[in-house]
Image (spheres, rainbow, N blue to C red):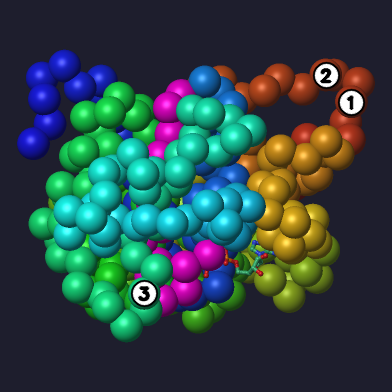
């Protein structure tokens, strides 16, 4: 149970239906951005079969304990909640390391999230597994809000739409869409749906649009979220913008003369 003096905490599940559309990438980058904005953030890897949030954050060597051991009383939450060395207000918890042993229940998941809330975290982002089976049901259980990730492909959109329906049936009122791997060149050629069209089909408000960017893959391989890198990347800027929108901060304003970084992003949103 949460205690009275717990600070307000937003629990947001990052979900999609289809696998491989960018949930883990979004969890790592949005989480890092929100931490850099000064909030205390915990990221939960609830994708047990394809656990890779630790890799994206470069924390794979530090995962000794997981929520599984906490639940079984073999360690304290603090031992499983790994603090990022770069941003000490960012922590990560893996639900389980063992693909075979998936016996985490909804109740376990809610207890873990409540314990993290009690430690004063302001944002908890849950990286949801693909699909709509038990893993999905468990991952959404403790969340009040959702970010629905999709790519502008018909298969991903159909799954996202299905998940949007399930979220609605589970009383989620705050669901926002993150369109990932958007390619303005293909949209222009009518080879890809525009972000507006994608949003129209799924019918949930748009949180952001992230361009297809090879730097995402480079950063994954380095274990350093894109938004931490010294060189500015289009996808990194787009994640920053989405994170600011998620926490309700005004967008970073553009220098009137800069043109460069924000113009392509506006194009992604279909504003140019
Ligand atoms: P999920 O967690 O939904 O399965 P991931 O976040 O693991 O998806 O992303 C799947 C793959 O797509 C990864 O190899 C990742 O690097 C790549 N990827 C994700 N977003 C982008 C992007 N905007 N541009 C290029 N590659 C991307
Ligand atoms: Mg993933």
Report x, y in % for residue 48: 38, 70
Magenta stretch: give its range.
Answer: 39-52
Image coords of residue 128 (percent x, y): 38, 62
Residue 7 picture location, percent across and down:
25, 20
Query: Which residue lies under the disc numbered 2?
Result: 255
Asked whether residue 42 is drawn in magenta, I would say yes
Answer with left or right where residue 236 lies relative to residue 35: right
Distance, label 1 to label 2, CA atoms, is 5 Å
- Badge 3 vs badge 2, beta-carbon distance below 8 Å: no
Label for residue 210? none
Return the residue at label 1: 258
In the structure shown, which secondary structural element does the residue marked by tag 1 occupy? Answer: loop
Question: Where is residue 37 drawn, in percent x and y?
Answer: 55, 23
Circle 3 is placed at which residue position?
Answer: 98
Q: From the viewer's perspective, is the residue at label 1 or at label 3 nearer?
A: 3
Of 109 and 27, the residue lying toward us: 109
Sooner in the amino-acid sequence: mark 3 or mark 2 = 3
The residue drawn where x is 22% and y is 29% is 118
């Amino acid at each position: 149970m949460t205690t009275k003096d717990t600070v307000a905490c937003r629990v947001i599940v990052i979900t999609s239906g289809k696998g491989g559309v960018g949930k883990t990438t979004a969890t790592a980058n949005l989480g890092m951005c929100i931490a850099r904005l000064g909030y205390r953030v915990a990221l939960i890897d609830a994708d047990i079969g394809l656990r890779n949030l630790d890799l994206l954050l470069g924390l794979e060597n530090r995962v000794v304990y997981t929520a599984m051991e906490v639940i079984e009383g073999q360690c304290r939450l603090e031992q499983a909640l790994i603090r990022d060395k770069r941003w000490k207000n960012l922590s990560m918890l893996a639900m389980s390391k063992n693909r075979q042993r998936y016996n985490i229940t909804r109740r376990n998941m809610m207890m873990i999230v409540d314990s993290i809330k009690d430690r004063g975290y302001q944002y908890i982002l849950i990286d949801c597994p693909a699909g709509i089976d038990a893993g999905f049901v468990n991952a959404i259980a403790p969340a009040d809000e959702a970010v629905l990730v999709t790519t502008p492909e018909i298969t991903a959109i159909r799954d996202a739409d299905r998940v949007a329906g399930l979220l609605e049936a589970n009383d989620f009122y705050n669901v926002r869409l993150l369109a990932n791997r958007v390619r303005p060149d293909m949209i222009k050629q009518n080879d890809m749906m525009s972000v507006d069209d994608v949003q129209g089909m799924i019918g949930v408000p748009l949180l952001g649009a992230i361009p297809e960017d090879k730097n995402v893959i480079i950063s994954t391989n380095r274990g350093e979220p894109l938004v931490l890198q010294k060189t500015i990347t289009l996808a990194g800027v787009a994640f920053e913008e989405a994170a600011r929108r998620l926490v309700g901060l005004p967008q970073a304003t553009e220098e009137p003369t800069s043109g460069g970084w924000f113009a392509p992003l506006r194009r992604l949103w279909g504003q140019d």
